[in-house]
Image: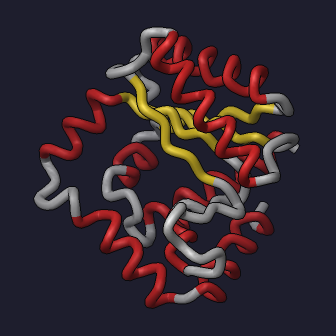
């Protein structure tokens, strides 16, 4: 199961995030093999945030590892429960002194932005094959944003692209990420 989940997420990063430029900074990390994929079987928020803290410590001790994707294969299929995990994880980042060092992005197969309809194709900018927390080095993100001409335009550009391609397109692409071995 671990290999399947990692492969699906690697496929997603390459064939969605990089190919459609949802994150203009991801290509470099993929090409440099600087993304760590960690499968977590945690099913409780408490265990999941401990996994996240372990990954923060691993990133601190491994400077060549730029970023980590924690992939939850057993728990958090319910999007609302996943959002509770995200809130807890962000609070724990602050409580453990990682604020300003790491930040979190999150992805889920059923991701829905707070102001969006469930069937809005824009949700696919944050939909992934598995629930995942992305631990990002803040200093690296700040450096990348400084070198990008108009970083504020990234979300709007992603939304326009997602809506132009449509829901069926993104659904098929996510299915392909899960099917490729």
Q: Which colour scheme appears in the figure? A: secondary structure
Residue 92 at x, y = what percent? 56, 19
Q: Quadrant of the C terminus?
A: bottom right
The reply, left or right, for residue 129 in relation to residue 157 is right
87 relative position to 175: left or right: left
Disc tally is: 0
Quadrant location of residue 148? bottom left
Percent position (x, y) of residue 73? 82, 43
Residue furthest front as drawn: 115
**Image point (54%, 33%), residue name:** 68
**Rendering coords of residue 104 (x, y %):** 48, 36
Query: Which residue is pictured at 69% across the width and 81% down the height?
Result: 172
Percent across and percent down for residue 160 are 37, 81
Q: Which residue is at the front of the view, 180 or 114?
A: 114
Quadrant assignment for the N terminus: top right
Say which residue appears at 15% left-offset and 61% top-offset.
Answer: 150
Please indicate whether residue 10 sits to the left or right of residue 148 in the image.
Answer: right
Which residue appears at 51% of the width and 10% of the height? 96
Q: Is residue 44 above or below residue 29?
A: above
Classify 114 as above or below 85.
Answer: below
In the image, 79 versus 59, the foreground residue is 79
Most foreground residue, 165 or 31: 165
């Amino acid at each position: 199961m671990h290999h399947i989940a990692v492969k699906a997420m690697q496929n997603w990063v390459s064939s969605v995030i990089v190919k459609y430029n949802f994150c203009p900074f991801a290509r470099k990390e993929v090409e440099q093999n600087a993304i760590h994929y960690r499968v977590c079987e945690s099913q409780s928020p408490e265990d999941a945030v401990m996994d996240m803290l372990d990954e923060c410590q691993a990133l601190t001790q491994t400077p060549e590892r730029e970023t980590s994707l924690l992939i939850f294969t057993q728990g958090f299929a319910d999007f609302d429960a996943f959002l509770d995990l995200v809130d807890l994880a962000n609070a724990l980042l602050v409580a453990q002194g990682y604020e300003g060092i790491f930040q979190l992005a999150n992805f889920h197969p059923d991701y829905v932005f707070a102001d969006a309809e469930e069937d809005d194709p824009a949700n696919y900018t944050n939909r992934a094959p598995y629930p995942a927390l992305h631990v990002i080095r803040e200093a690296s993100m700040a450096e990348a944003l400084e070198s990008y001409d108009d970083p504020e335009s990234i979300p709007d550009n992603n939304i326009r692209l997602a809506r132009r391609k449509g829901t069926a397109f993104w659904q098929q692409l996510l299915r392909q990420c899960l099917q490729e071995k």
